[in-house]
Amino acid sequence: MGTRVLVVDDHVETVRVISDVLTREGFSVVSARNGEECLRQVEAERPDLIILDVMMPVMDGLRALRALRENPETRTLPVIVLTVRDQQGDVLAGWMAGADLYINKPCRIDELVAAVRRMTLAGAHA
């Protein structure tokens, strides 16, 4: 089984596109629709990396990210924040919450795949 990526976004089409591309690239992909589901999936699936949206119902992505960073078992789990929130304050909030990478939507899918590859390879060598 390939590297496991958790894609967290409430927009079904976004999850489908990212999942399809990453699966074709050899990654194993699971998904969640909000921050609460993200935390449950992290515990159940033990992903190697998370792609996390910010604006979602139930629990937003930054709250989920802070919860991941507070947990010793997930503190170093790589997280790419992928969001439309692009104001300077939004980006700073993402970094302060513990994002490893902050990418604005829309993004080029090949750049996202390259970031996932780079981050999962870095994690394998850490």
Image (cartoon, grey):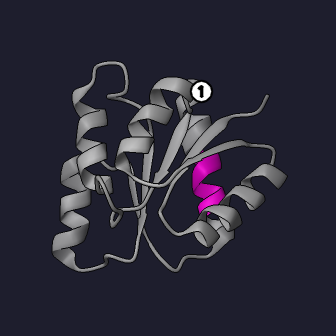
In the rendered view, does 70 fall on the left or right side of 109? left
Question: Percent x, y for residue 101?
Answer: 40, 55
From the image, which quarter does the N terminus lie in?
Answer: top right
Question: Percent x, y for residue 49?
Answer: 53, 40
Given residues 113 and 51, the one toward you in this image is 51
Residue for point 43% across, 46% down = 79
* Residue 53: quarter of image: bottom left
Q: Is residue 27 magenta?
A: no
In the rendered view, does 121 fall on the left or right side of 126? right
Residue for point 64% across, 57% down = 114
> Which residue, given by chain and number where applicable, does mark 1 sit on?
124
Question: Percent x, y for residue 89?
Answer: 15, 72
Q: Is residue 115 magenta?
A: yes
Q: Which residues are magenta?
A: 112-118
Amino acid type of disc 1?
A: Ala
Q: Find numbered disc 1 in the image and state the secondary structure of the residue it sits on.
A: helix
In the rendered view, does 113 fall on the left or right side of 55? right
- The extreme front residue here reads 58
Q: How many marks?
A: 1
Given residues 101 and 61, the one toward you in this image is 61
**Dot 1 alpha-carbon crowd within 10 angstroms: few under 14, some 14 to 19, many 20 or more:** few
Q: Is residue 6 above or below residue 107?
A: above
Q: Can residue 126 be seen by looking at this rendering? A: no
Residue for point 47% across, 77% down = 105
Residue for point 57% across, 28% down = 45
Given residues 75 and 31, the one toward you in this image is 31
